[in-house]
Amino acid sequence: MYSIAMVIIFVLGYLCIALEHPLKLDKAAIALLIGVLTWSVFIVFGETDIHEVGTMLNENLAETAQTLFFLFAAMTIVEIIDRHNGFKVITDKINATSKVKLMWLIGILTFFMSAVLDNLTTTIVILSLLRKLINDKETRWTFASIVVLAANAGGAWSPIGDVTTIMLWIGGQITALNIIKEIFIPSMVSLVVPLAALSFTLKGELDRPAENSEKESLTTPAEQKGYLILGVSLLLFVPIYKTFTHLPPFMGMLLSLGTIWLVSHIQSTHSQGEKKERLSVAECLKHVDTSTIFFFLGILTAVGALGAAGQLGKLSEWLRDATSGNIYVIDSVIGILSSIIDNVPLVAASMGMYSIDPNVAEFAVDGTFWSMLAYCAGTGGSILIIGSAAGVAAMGLEQIDFIWYLKHISWLALIGYFSGVLCIYAGL
């Protein structure tokens, strides 16, 4: 009975998050409540030993904390760049006034950036750019949603572009060169199809926000360019650092934050008055969106409780039995489920259920099952805005309404997703 209660709490909380605007609720508060309540039911009414549950909670907290530190550090680095007006260097070079032209430019840029960085960091960076380019809220929501689609698609074909591909790469199920070769075209198709569909409906010219001349006067063009180059270089350094040290990505991000923080501090000691105060890292930290951090905390904690209680494992077993082991159906359904439940525990459960088998082509290293799993788990989260780290970040940073995304973007993500699936099935 306790497992049913946990699922009910999660579903009700999910509905409250989806309907936050009509209900006038705060999604961060709801996420925290369902995170704590699911674990409370599990530890009070569950049949597992209390000490074992405590160990599970600690493990979940350790995994969640890595994501939160990564997110917080990345958001702070982006805020430091923005505070020094570094993104002006890029926005001044983007002359596109057509919404369609900018949509394709942002989509392709995000697609390739997320493969080099990762989908979460790329989303944070590109959303910061969009605020300089687009004034109208709903238009910016549309472009932010495109960023989510592109970031998840770009992360799926790179061994370092998404948490799930990193898991499969480290686990030995896929190799770096093969995942690029096998999944690049399906991932590109999953983005191009929605962009092509939007090209027929997205009309008009862009309304750019007014430039803040007071903010520009605090930094010189050399400082703006310097902080942009330094910040982006440090973000690009994160996957390199992970590759060589094998430490979790958040360690590289904290190292990058410490570096740019130190540079900013040293520079501020030679500044005076308002410039010293407004460009300090302490001031930047005040503008980091902490409600998004708490939203992530609640969602990941709740999903961790469902995983610890065994619901996700049971779901994977049921899926295997219901599909008679058809790998295309299993991977496709996992992708759709990842739009509701975090893709990390779903992929982890799949890795636990299916072992690498060199005697079975689909389950051998670089087998179709593993490559398709990387694609489906990565891009399927775009179907709902809450289904991926990139989507959750966009929802928090831009305050995108869940129902709005469901009405305007989900169908685009869905046709893109299944277009990529067909490419894999056809062997493209």
Image: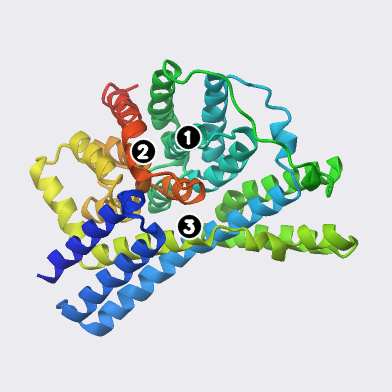
Q: Classify the position of the C terminus by image quarter.
A: top left
Q: Does residue 290 lie above or below 136 as drawn?
A: below
Residue at far top of view: 200
Residue 379 position, x and y percent, is 37, 38
Quarter occupied by residue 35: bottom left
Camera-nearest residue between 267 and 217: 217
Residue 374 position, x and y percent, is 36, 41
In whole angstroms, how far apart are the C-alphas of marks 2 and 3? 19 Å
Sequence order check, earlier mark of 1 and 2: 1
- The answer to whether the residue labelled 1 contacts the one labelled 3, judged by CB atoms less than 8 Å apart, is no
Question: Which residue, given by chain and number where applicable, does mark 1 sit on?
Answer: 138
Question: Which residue, given by chain and number where applicable, does mark 3 sit on?
Answer: 292
Q: Classify the position of the N terminus by image quarter.
A: bottom left
Q: Residues within 10 Å of mark 1 (few under 14, many from 20)?
A: few
Q: Residues within 10 Å of mark 3 (few under 14, many from 20)?
A: many
Q: Does residue 17 lie above or below 179 as drawn?
A: below
Left or right of residue 92, residue 356 in this image: left
